[in-house]
Image (cartoon, coloured by chain):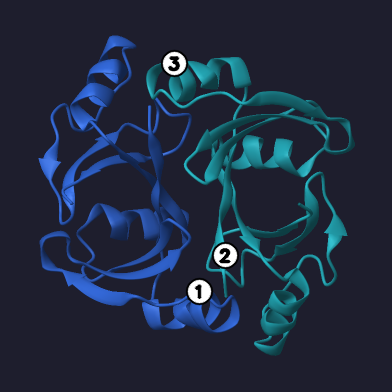
Chain colours: A cyan, B blue
Amino acid sequence: MKAKIDHVGIVVHDIQEALKAYQAALGLPLKEIVAVPDQKVQVAFLPVGESNVELVQPLSDDTGIARFLTQRGEGIHHICFEVEDIEAVLAQLKEHQVQLIDEVPRQGAHGRVAFVHPKAMHGVLVELVERSH
Amino acid sequence: MKAKIDHVGIVVHDIQEALKAYQAALGLPLKEIVAVPDQKVQVAFLPVGESNVELVQPLSDDTGIARFLTQRGEGIHHICFEVEDIEAVLAQLKEHQVQLIDEVPRQGAHGRVAFVHPKAMHGVLVELVERSH
């Protein structure tokens, strides 16, 4: 499978505070901060090589991201792999009886995405994206 | 700063079990499995683009990795950024009063490495590596 790490998602209480560490101190560039009203989050993209660090701040208490933050605290939330053919990867995962959150890809901001269940991936929430270039 | 994600470290109970998900089902290639007796762990490297997924299995109960596994369960343990000049990045982190685990770089398997404290990085254990090519 041809793939790369698209991004690593990190849940934080306050993007501006987190940028002091990741942008100012560590030196990653900030590409943009965008609100995603659908998911009630704000996201900062910091490119690093062919990947991105994504800082995610919940904008409401009634979301999965907000619950993650309350229960587990700040930290890495998921890892997203860009794949060439998301249907083929999902078919292969199903063939191996891997538990999926999304049985079929859904439309994301940058292409079709699907989440794999963290139980199946040994505690890691895995997102797949097939980018529409 | 010119940087890339060198690897994402995932702690697992059993590398062979985890490979069923990451190699067989997800389709990542397996480069090698190596024992690191110093750290009492076994590590599998699965290249993905310019980065690697690193599966880490503790080989003893008296290590930080083993305690992480007992306390938090399987999951992402750290993210490692490859940087060009590790001294410069550490100096910049110190200038911003970021708490470090390693004040000076130490020799790792593939170059000089230093860990940044997860409290300073909003819950993320960050490793820096300057590879000796």
Compared to B24, does B76 lie above or below? above
Measuring 39% from the left and 62% from the top, which residue is drawn there?
Answer: B11
**Residue A87 rendering spot, x and y as whole percentages:** 78, 74
Task: Kindly identify which chain the residue marked by label 1 belongs to.
Answer: B
**10 Å neighbourhood of mark 3: few (<14), some, or many (≥20)?**
some
On the picture, is B23 further left or further right than A100? left
Distance between mark 3 and mark 1 Cα atoms: 34 Å
Measuring 41% from the left and 23% from the top, which residue is drawn there?
Answer: A27
Are tags 2 and 3 found on a single chain? yes
Q: Nearer the viewer, mark 2 or mark 3?
A: 2
Compared to A47, does B111 lie above or below? below
**Residue, disc 1:** B28
**10 Å neighbourhood of mark 2: few (<14), some, or many (≥20)?**
some
The circle drawn on residue B86 is none
**Residue A47 rendering spot, x and y as whole percentages:** 54, 35
What amino acid is at disc 2? Ala
On the picture, is B71 further left or further right than A87? left
Q: State the quadrant of the N terminus of chain A.
A: bottom right
Instruction: Evaluate if marks 1 and 2 touch, with contact meaning CB atoms under 8 Å apart.
Output: yes
